Image: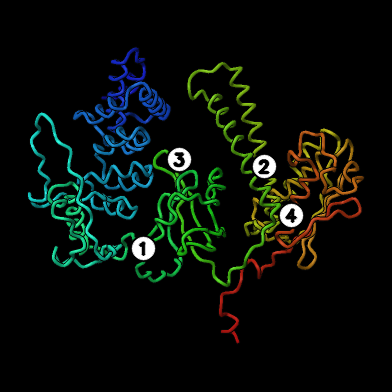
Amino acid sequence: MHLDDRLATVLRHRAAGPRAAGTQYRQLLDLLGSRLAGRDGSMLAAAWLRLAALGETIPAGDRASMIREPGVRFRNPELALHLADDEPEVAAAALGVANLSEDDWEALVPRLPIRARGFLRLRRDLPAGTRELLERLGVRDRGLPRPDTIADVIEVPAAGPSIAPAPPPPPAVASPPRPIPANDHADFDGPAAAPSRQVPETAADDSEIGALVRRIEAFRKTRAPHAGEADPRLPLGETTHETRPPLSGFAFTTDAEGRIDWADGAAAPMVMHALLAPAAERARARRPIEAARIEWFGAPQVAGEWIVDASPRFSTPDGHFVGYAGRFRRPSAAEPVVETDPAADRMRQLLHELKNPVNAVQGYAEMIQQQLFGPVPHEYRALAAAIAGDAARILAGFDELDRLARLETGALELDGGSAEISAVFGGLARQLGEVLRTRGAAFALSAGDAPCSVPFGQHEMEALGWRLLATVTGAAGAGETLPLEIGCAGDVVKVVCALPPSLAKAQDVFSGAAPAGGGAVSAGMFGAGFALRLARAEARSAGGDLVCEDGALVLTLPRLTASAANPSPVGMDAAAG
């Protein structure tokens, strides 16, 4: 078969009645459960939607019967996860017949709803690793064992014309109270050693209570030798266990929303399904989490301050973002505590909330423009492309706001590196000079021959230079010549750029009241004042500054000397001495 179009054939037909709906539901179960449904993402998405729609029209009992049919192939963990959210009988049927590998079970079980995990305890054919995982997650069979002897089974008399009601139990015999042990470590030497647990002979022989008591005794006898310190215990007066020391670190993974779906060792039951704030904040941008300091509230072993490092994870082969994988570690005394500004934190949280709807609008516009769900008229594609472009500009503005808030509070440090400032500003001046030439304006560049390297990454330096020169270019008028001087003086690199008269007359060029340029080139969507303020924050983060003096912008940065660029090996000075 060169082209597998079975899924497309099934989706092409509409279920006109209950019988057709049941037939199509069986077909989708078989195709999606066999992992051979094709690699077309849109086709698979349509199949999942059709399966959910059919599930709303077919009773839960009928769906459970279809899933249990011998001919249905069930080797896809995604199908098991999809059906686990349905009614209990459907979820039990799906998890009861799923034929998955140990790796598939290991990836599926933490993602299952908590109520659905209990259905797996009834299976006896799961791999050993899966059983261990269920044991760690606390999924166990708590049913009482059946009696081992025939004598323990209650004999029900044969049904006659009528059954007389059971006689009332005899009055209780007064006896000194004796507490029942609250755990599974009590010793049992047989019925003679525990007379207080015996019930009156008539009740033990003729009532269901006696049989239940014997089953409880059998359960305790079989379980007591295997009881350990890890078993759950109730605080009913016994001696308190020794408090365990706090954990020093543990590994973890999260889902795409930032919720912890796996944790290492003893931390698993204390942090599972909790929302990790740094992961939720960076999930949209798919950015790594580096030394994020958080305060965790919960069990004593995990409560307190933590430092989180994590990297984004992507599925193969489609490359979809599936969450983070990283590690919690306790902060050491040598690590500085970064004081954050509450106002900046509120701004960052607000931007995070605003990005979500804009991302959704951009995604839907791109799907319409690319015709992912079918043909779209060109007029609507043009509108969708314009909406996607506007959303991209809005997101870029949000990123600039977030960048300024983090730089001004010290929460962000720019990447180090080395950049030649004369080459960066010279290239930008020549590029923007083509725009100024149409107005009869130009930059008058003056740069020395000495190398002027600064401790900035190439990309960061180009972004800072663009903010400065693009802001000046947008405000320049016709026929204006703007001097641009670049030079080095000792350990300082200085860039002086004259301001156009429209900006020079402003009381504070770094405020939001600074006039924005009306040209085709601008440094951002928030105007000249915001762009210059962001450039000043970037310069200060590297040990420099940006000021306005005598109608000109003066950018000063530390000079990266040869010794700083190429440090001597450790111990060389000592060896020379």
Q: Nearer the viewer, mark 1 or mark 3?
A: 1
Amino acid type, label 1: Leu
Amino acid type for the residue under numbered disc 2? Phe
Residue under numbered circle 4? 537
The residue lying furthest to the top in this view is: 16
Residue labelled with disc 2: 398
Which residue appears at 77% of the width and 45% of the height? 530
- Amino acid at pointer 3: His
Q: Which residue is mark 1?
A: 236
Where in the figure is residue 468, as x and y percent of width and height? Answer: 77, 47
Distance from Cα at disc 1 to Cα at disc 3: 50 Å
The crowding category of the residue bearing disc 1, from other C-alpha atoms within 10 Å (few below 14, some 14 to 19, many at least 20), is few
Quadrant of the rendering where the C terminus is positioned:
bottom right
Residue labelled with disc 3: 320
Look at the numbered discs 1 and 4 and tell me whether their residues touch, using CB distance below 8 Å: no
Q: How many marks?
A: 4
| Amino acid type, residue under disc 4 in the picture | Ala
Mark 2 or 4 closer to N-term? 2
